[in-house]
Image (cartoon, rainbow, N blue to C red):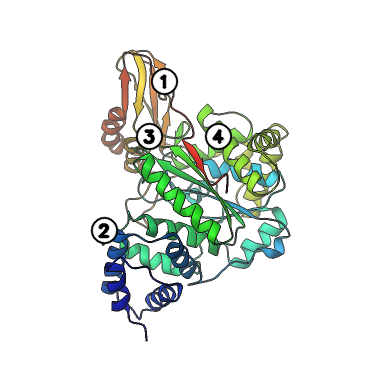
Amino acid sequence: MMRAVDLIIKKRDKLPLTAEELEFLIRSYTDGVIPDYQMAAWAMAVRLNGMDPQEITDLTLSMAHSGDMLNLKDIGSLVVDKHSTGGVGDKTTLTVAPIVAACGLPVGKMSGRGLGFSGGTIDKLESIPGFHADLSTSEFLNQLKQYGIVISGQSADLAPADGKLYALRDVTGTVDSIPLIASSIMSKKIASGADAIVLDVKTGRGAFMKTLAQAEALADVMVSIGRLSKRRVIAVLSPMDQPLGFAVGNALEVKEGVEMLRGRGPEDYRYHCLHLAAYMLLLGNKVTSVDEGIVLAEKAIRDGSGMAKFRELIQAQGGDVRVVDDLESLPKAGQVFQIEAEQTGWVSAVDAKEIGESSVILGAGRVKKGDPIDPAVGIMVKAKIGDKVEKGQVVFEVHVNNEARYHEAMVKIKKALIISQRPVEVPPYFLGVVGLDK
């Protein structure tokens, strides 16, 4: 007979756990048989001693099988998904999912709401009046089959072990364990049923993984889990030292995401969207190279099919599609303040963490789960790293509904921008790809 204490001791002593032992541990914890204090001890042993790739995969599959498993075989095609580890101004799903679906590759995505300064795709979409994100499993599957695209909130019945374990990790100092992060992300992706997954692993000031080495380690583990779980997985490493694109804030990001479907928008965001779409098309066997995927993605923008697919998505989920055609009808803040550059020079930093935290102060994000958010507020970043700016030039536009909050946020926003007296190189948009040769 298995006992939790024996598995804690085994992991404490740096010994690997078997698939059966991990299945027992996860099932018993989900069912309430193993108490929090024992699971916390086990999580700390994992945090300190790590796990080997097979162990992490077995843990992931046990967590995935702790609840419902979506079966997407009836869709009649490979289904692809993408996941970002979180960042500031990261609205890529709004642009990428419709582009990929317009190219004939179904995209079935379950997304979360934002917590802290890392925005959530569902919050952004809910800026559109009437948009309904809480779909049942049958609604999710029917929409995916009919339209080839669905973006819904995370089902409570999907990988319930992860929700329970994450809450415990959050209060026991074990959130930053790579095996536990990787199994948390991948258990939900595997339970969601996608055949192929493109991961966007962020690194830098506005990311959870602060260094490229940490991001690479996480990417390696998640690609390994995918391979051992018979899924096609690629992980793109991307910088998050400054916000992605110009817009930070829910309605502002929807506007930027939709504008990109019309071929208009910041260059870093365009590059990001086209390449993520290309990797998804490559994994889904729609193209044979990344370059071919970029050409196909550009065509979906140029011929309007990506925009048409976005309209289908919004309409299918009850959103007011008139907003898509008239972006000025999205929620608007009562006041817009401008922040000007205090000197002439070249932008050397636009701290994503400071900007993200400022957006939360304004009301665009949550401090704790369940907090209400204001879809209208946010920040437009008018200067990016490498740009030449003149003294008095507008570098930020701050959209606010509460002037007191603006004055609190302004201090952080101003601190985010650093201007150098020497030219600064534009940083790379991507830092590498893991798993492309697998």
Label 1 residue SS: loop
Q: Measure the alpha-carbon separation of dots 2 and 1.
A: 37 Å
In primary-sequence order, the first of circles 1 and 3 is: 3
Rendered position, 173 above or below 241: below
Q: Nearer the viewer, residue 65 or 246?
A: 65
Residue at mark 2: 173
Of the residues tagged 4 and 3, which is closer to the observer? Answer: 3
Q: Which residue is drawn at 59% across and 33% down?
A: 260
Q: Nearer the viewer, residue 229 or 117?
A: 229
**Residue type indicated by callout 4:** Glu
Residue at mark 1: 425
* Quadrant housing residue 71: bottom right
Q: Residue 328 bears which disc, if any?
A: 4
Q: Position of residue 73 (x, y in %)?
A: 68, 64
Q: Nearer the viewer, residue 159 or 320?
A: 159
**Residue type indicated by callout 2:** Gly
Do the residues bearing badges 3 and 2 touch, measured as CB atoms within 8 Å? no
